[in-house]
Image (cartoon, rainbow, N blue to C red):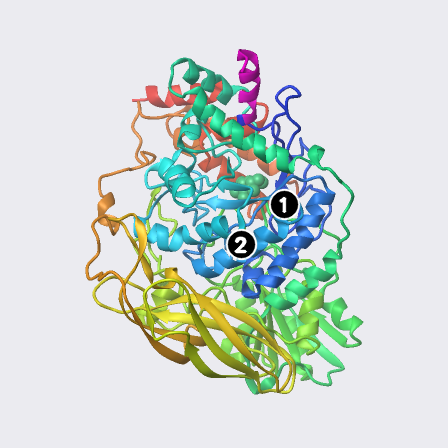
Amino acid sequence: MGENNFERKLLILSGKGMWHTNDCGGLYPQLLLSDGPHGLRKQDEGKKDINDSYVSTCYPTASCLAASWDRELVFKVADSLGKEAWNADVSVLLGPGVNIKRSPLCGRNFEYYSEDPFLAGEIGASFINGVQQNGVGTSLKHFAGNSQETRRMTSNSRIDERTLREIYLSAFENCVKKAKPATVMVSYNYLNGYKATENKHLLTDILRDDWGYEGVTVSDWGACIDIAKSVKAGLDLEMPSSGKAHLKKLKKDINAGSISDEELLTAIGRLEKLIDKYAAANRKDNSKKSVDSHKVALEAALGGAVLLKNEENILPLKDVKEINLIGELARTLRFQGAGSSHIKTRPQVNIIEEFEKAGIKVNFAPGYRVDTVKEDEVLSKEALELVKNGLPTIICGGLTDLAEGEGYDRKTLDIPENQIKLFEKIESENLVFLSFGGSPFTVPFMSKVKAMLHMYLGGEAVAEAAVKLLLGESNPSGRLAETWPFQISDTPAHGCFAAESNEVYYVEGLLVGYRHYDTKGIETLFPFGYGLSYTTFEYSDLSLSSKEYSGGEIKVRFKVKNTGTVPGAEVAQIYVENPYDGFARAKHELRGFEKIFLNPGEEKDVEITIGERAFSVFDTELNSFNISGGEYTVCVGTDIDHLILCEKLAVKGKDYVKEPAGTGLDVFIGKNDSNLDNVKPGEYSVYHSLGELSKKSSLGKKLMYSAIKKARSMYKGASDDSPEVMMMVETIKDGPIDCIILQSGILPYWIAEKIVKQANAKK
Ligand code: BGC
């Protein structure tokens, strides 16, 4: 290859603008990458406001989709979204996110599926397949160990190898192997001492060598600082463009021999394949695909809603002509989360209007405001007066935008104080709680409500879906994909989640989510897998294809019958009880599931296949998954706390009685610190955050305050705790100086270097 051609090709390693790949002076057609994953957030280059994108369909967020436990439904949503992306000439849709929910406080949990890797991996694979069958690629994110938003760009996730493989990487592995995502998006954080984008163990040893991934790895937006180091570790594409700064440094590294042409050509080659396959300009037939996306969004909102309580079968509402509706969230719907997955969608019909459309008279009182957590006594009094009329009352509440969003974590498990105060005072016989939010929360007024229907963040059709479910036109069939704990102190990562330090130790190890509550016998508000229906189901005739197992697949067979009077869907869940012999294992683990639709009186034979992973542990000495022998119990249940039928299974395998070396966090002590905490002058670099540097550099301090001021002025009228402002401010403080300068789009790179120099010179 001619010298010039190689030089031109190098440009492909860094994006052009915010959303495109580089055309390398006409050498390649460009790829357009757009968010994802709850709808299409296609933005024109140059737009700064994250919410200013093209109008498109807003589907339910990931936490809601996962609660459907329905692979086909997720595939259908993704197919519809893939068609919208195709029609908009998008090459790669940035999603899905399959990170494991380590704590319910992660502000971005609404964008993730589950606390369980099997469920997250299955739902993720369906999503990828659904999008990609349309000729649009996906980006499996955020790879990996990105479980908190607090200092998401500098925190160092310290996860022992076994936990990493069994819990935090397993959903990624399933997606990579089953669905072959076109790209994998590499996260901002550090993992065990190495920035994820420079982490060879993650990007090459595991992703490519072990899992056989052949696609492209792309940095999360602004996560790449050093192209040569990153490419050497296994990164292919830096996004977005870093102007000339990073390419200039790359040239120096090439000249110094720090990276070979071969290494660079490997990354370039992978990008060329991606371009061949997904660039809109390469499409043979670019005709538009027809899609009834709102209908799909409605179906998904119905499928993901979870009925959490229904005393005296108060729901569905029968023969109602008039109701009271209390809560601002009935009028100002919350149906999606804030940040990069925010969809600019069509105007919404709210809950009040939907009830009216159904011919029901609504007496509405907002009761509280959503832009503050403070009680408004006038609104509160008005609502309390209204319910005195004795009509059936629905209170609408849950998490508001102030509580959760990208870029910041939740401070509390509670819903805003103004809602709690109001709902605790409400006196009404037949109270129904209709709730919204991307993550679990506490319900201190639970004893007051007869029913609770949780809609999650159900997308643009959430109000339509809620009213259909409340009136019984549709039967709830969602099941929780995450545990709802009673209190934050019960949660596995309590005390070590989003800690003060950049070093984040995953001390709970394998016991994440229900593995923690179930193994330790901690009671929960609602267990993993839980959800009610307007009908009832009965299980019978559990059998296993064999009583002994030494490898391959095993079939779990049973019957499920709808014993009630209305059609409905049941989610049959297979939990395997592990042998306990001194080797650390969770008590039960989810190993299979199936959603089954049944008419009244109908019975179906169900067969679920489980494979070797269900009986394996990651052996850190052998660096592979291996069957661990012993007596297992295979159960079918309706949630982790309700295992209905069980069968024993004798498993032949390795005799694991003690932890192999290299297991547990003690292996980290004194090793692989990210060097981002307690930095001393002389140690600062462009990897350090502006917040950290500004402690030592007057220029840094000045820049930080003026950038924050600018960010606030971009969202005029928005309060300091509005999600957009909070995300921007957190990023400015906690983002590496390299990223802050480059993403500003206007500041020259020497400012970053000067700030670092000043900090290093300070005594
Ligand atoms: C987010 C990604 C997103 C990207 C582009 C990042 O800040 O973490 O999930 O795809 O921005 O908007």
Q: What amino acid does circle 1 point to?
A: Ala
Counting from the top left corner in percent of width and height, residue 278 is at 64, 38
Counting from the top left corner in percent of width and height, residue 613 is at 38, 60
Q: What amino acid does circle 2 point to?
A: Ala
Identify the image quadrant of residue 648.
Answer: bottom left
Is residue 616 rendered magenta in the image? no
With respect to residue 618, does 361 lie above or below?
Answer: below
With respect to residue 250, does 569 lie above or below?
Answer: below
Identify the magenta region. 1-12
**Please, what secondary structure does the residue beneath circle 1 have?**
loop
User: Which disc, if any, is residue 224?
Assistant: none
Question: In the visual, does 304 lie left or right of 519?
Answer: right
**Please, what secondary structure does the residue beneath circle 2 have?**
helix
Identify the image quadrant of residue 520.
Answer: bottom left
The N terminus appears in which quarter of the rendering? top right
Mark closer to the observer (1, 2): 2
Counting from the top left corner in percent of width and height, residue 473 is at 71, 76
Mark 1 burial class by Cα count in 10 Å: few <14, some 14-19, many 20+:
some
Closer to the N terminus: mark 1 or mark 2?
A: 2
User: Which disc, if any, is residue 718?
Assistant: 1
Residue topped by disc 2: 125
